[in-house]
Every structure is written in C-alpha cells, then in structure tokens.
Amino acid sequence: MLANKRILLIVGGGIAAFKLPELVRMFRAAGAAVTPVLTRAGAEFVTPLTMGTLAGEEAHTALFDLTKEVEIGHIQLSRAADLVVVAPATADLMAKMATGAADDLASTLLLATDKRVLIAPAMNVRMWEHPATQRNMATLHRDGVTFAGPVSGDMACGEYGPGRMVEPAEIFAQVVAMLREGPLAGKRVVVTSGPTHEPIDPVRYIANRSSGAQGSAIARALAQLGAEVVFVTGPASVPPPEGVQVVRVETAAQMLAAVEAALPADAAVMAAAVADWRVAQPSEAKMKKENGGLPTLHFAENRDILAEVAQRRDGRPKLVVGFAAETHDVVAYATAKRARKGCDWIVANDVRPETGIMGGSENAVTLITADGAEDWPRMGKDAVAERLAARMAAAL
Ligand code: CTP
C-alpha cells in the first residue's frame, strides 16, 4: 500500500511515544521507507536506537551535526519525504509549528518542508483545552496541516478527556489515504452520510429511513480516485467503506461539529439525511407511562450543515454538493434548494415509495448545477457514486 513512499516521522516527547515502534512496523510492512527524527524530549521516551533499528535507517536527533549537514542537510531531509508525520505531537511542537519557530531539527524540518503534514496530538486534557493550544490548532488547520485525533480517553496522568493520541492503526490509515494516487490525490473531501438520531430521552430517539448506502458508496468512490475522505456518519445500517477516516456521530449537532472540525477541505458532499428538528429538551430520565397522560414533544430546528458550509466566508470548500429528496416537482424543488442553500450542485432524487430508492440499492438522480438539470438513468447506487466522483474530479 505504501510501496516507494518515504515518511518522515517526527517523534515528540510524550508518553504516547511508546506506541511509535508499532507505527514504524506498520509503515515498513506496507512497503514504506521511514526516516525517524526524535526531538530531545522524544528521545527520552523512545530511544533513537529502537526507532532506527525498526526503521532500518538511522534516527536523527540533533540539528547541528556538521558532517550530516553536509551529507544530508535538513532541507533535503524534509523534501525527500512524501509525507511528514508528527506523533506524538506535543503542545510544545504544535506551538512551534503554529509560530514557525525552528530551534531544533524537528521544528526546522517542519518549517522547511514542502510536503503535507499529518499530526497526531497527545497531551494532558487541560493542555489540549488551553486557549493557546486551541488557537494553535486553528492556525495549523488554516495552514493546511491534517490532524489525526486526539481522542478522549483515560490518560497516563490519571485524568480523562480529549488529548489522547489516536491508535497507530488510525494514523496508518490516514497516511495511506493521504498518499493515495489518482485524479483526486491530495484532495480532501468531507462526506456526510446516514440518518441522525435525535434523543427524546435516554432510551428513545427520532430517526429516519436512510441506510447510508449512497453516502458510503460516494465516500468509497472518492477514495478510489485518490481523495483523502473524512466520512462523518450517523448511525447507518450500511458499514463505512475501507480507507476513509470515519467519524461516528448520532445527532445533527454532533454532525455539524464533526464537519466543522474536518474543514478545511477541497470539497464536501452532504449525503446525510439530517433531522430537520430535534426535541428541544430531551428528558434526562426515561419518560414513564405511570406519570399519566400523553407526552408532548416540543421541537427546535437543527442548524443546516449544508447551508452553513456552502455559505462560509472563510475556508469554503471549492465544491459543495448537497442532496435533495423530493416526492414531486423534483427539478423545480431541487433547483430552488440549490439557490437557497448556496451549494454548487444538488443531487436530486425522487423518493416516492413506489420508486424503491430510499433504502434500496438503485438510484435515479438528477444533477442540478449552475448549467441546469441533467437526468441520469436509473442505476446502482455504486454506479451513481462513481459517476459523481468522476464529475467531482473533473471539476476540481
Ligand atoms: N442538510 C444538512 N443539514 C440539515 C438539513 C439538511 O446538511 N440540518 C443537507 C442534507 O444532507 C442534504 C440537503 O441538506 O444534502 C437536504 O436538504 P433538506 O432541506 O433537508 O431537504 P430535504 O431533505 O429534501 O427536505 P425538504 O424538502 O423538507 O427541505
């Protein structure tokens, strides 16, 4: 999967560094060459000898080694790689990256590189939540740095919360996605899919019949063309495709937050059947019959993820694709929806029960663009996905 690829692996000083040998092993098994670079603190947690032995090449640590500076040079070291991975990315390394500081080999390489950078943050929850780190994260996002995690979990320091490094397998999957080849290589696409669940009380929710089949197929087709796909999925009945970054959510609000966290991206495809309304105040305890009477639910409107992404001033994806499920006047409604939401394309489909489309394996869609409406013949959802992905590749 990674044959002929070279990864520059920068190891920061965090306890999560103990997982790095496993990551190197995965890269090597996939055919990649790995150049390990350890910060001074990183070398306290995992030794250069361990990293160098597993990588099959010397691990670098210091900046001013004159012999090496002549032989290799930090510029060359940073350019020879296809991708730079920083794991664990400590708060300090993130701060250096965000400000462009270059006072050791690792930070100098990060400033000198012209390659894409993937970072896997790992730190104490308070350090992660500190405004300084959050500011640095936003800056790095804007600079085009890709994030793997962090996730929430128990920490070595005994606390619980966000700040834990994602598992090596996840970093590996993201690297594979980022190094894919094809017409969409180097493009990042966010895809939403599936239904959302809006809680009524701790055991009940409101949902819809979306299976997630079309969204899954689109994510797969985009990944096959080389895109790096962030797949934000509600509780779908169809499993997510391989080779995409999966973010699981339940509610529309969580889906919006996940999409915002996944931006910036080159394109966004909003295939999810997002609930338009949520229960305004879900009950904290299970609602009981013996309380008498019939319950009354009060609703609040969910924010429109598609419209918000399409109407962003800052960092709007170049291509924003929405879906429209209609039961009549498909083209007229979908054309109006395109204008109202501000997206570039709408994939409209007729979801009258007799079409068997919702929850079925086939789809008959009309693609609405600035140039008008285009009817596609009825075909499998995979074929619709492939055709849409090819169109997106051409447009991007
Ligand atoms: N969408 C969204 N966030 C919402 C609601 C919808 O992102 N809160 C997106 C869907 O993913 C889809 C498109 O908007 O891409 C569908 O728009 P919507 O207004 O929900 O259309 P329909 O479901 O077709 O319903 P209606 O005709 O009632 O507007």
Image: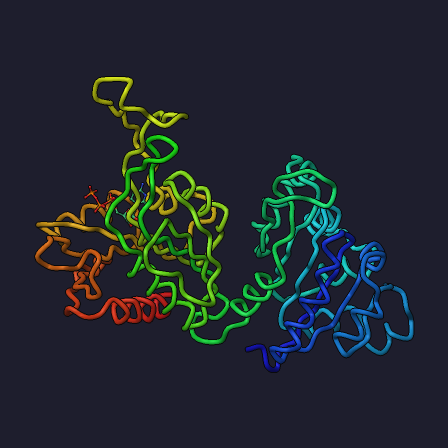
Q: Nearer the viewer, residue 172 or 284?
A: 284
Count of labels in the image: 0
**Displayed quadrant of residue 256:** top left
**Furthest residue to the front?**
290
User: Residue 291 lies in what quarter of the image?
Assistant: top left
- Left or right for 270, reference 48: left
Residue closer to the observer: 213 or 365: 213
Query: Foreground: 161 or 74?
Result: 161
Is residue 51 toward the left or the right of residue 237 in the image?
right
Quadrant of the image occupied by residue 152: top right
- The residue drawn where x is 41% and y is 73% is 225
In which quadrant of this rendering is ligand 1 seen? top left
Q: Position of residue 90 (x, y in %)?
A: 72, 49
Which residue is painted at 63% across and 62% down in the image?
168
Residue located farthest toward the right when viewing the structure as drawn? 66
Which colouring convention does the figure follow? rainbow
Residue 155 vertical placement versus 79 (above, below) = above
**Residue 11 percent location from the top left of the image:** 75, 60
* Residue 298 location (% of width, % of height): 27, 24
- Residue 15 in picture, x, y percent from top left: 76, 52
Quadrant for the C terminus in the image: bottom left
Q: Quadrant of the N terminus?
A: bottom right
Judge from the rendering whether residue 226 lies leftward or rightward of residue 98; answer left or right: left
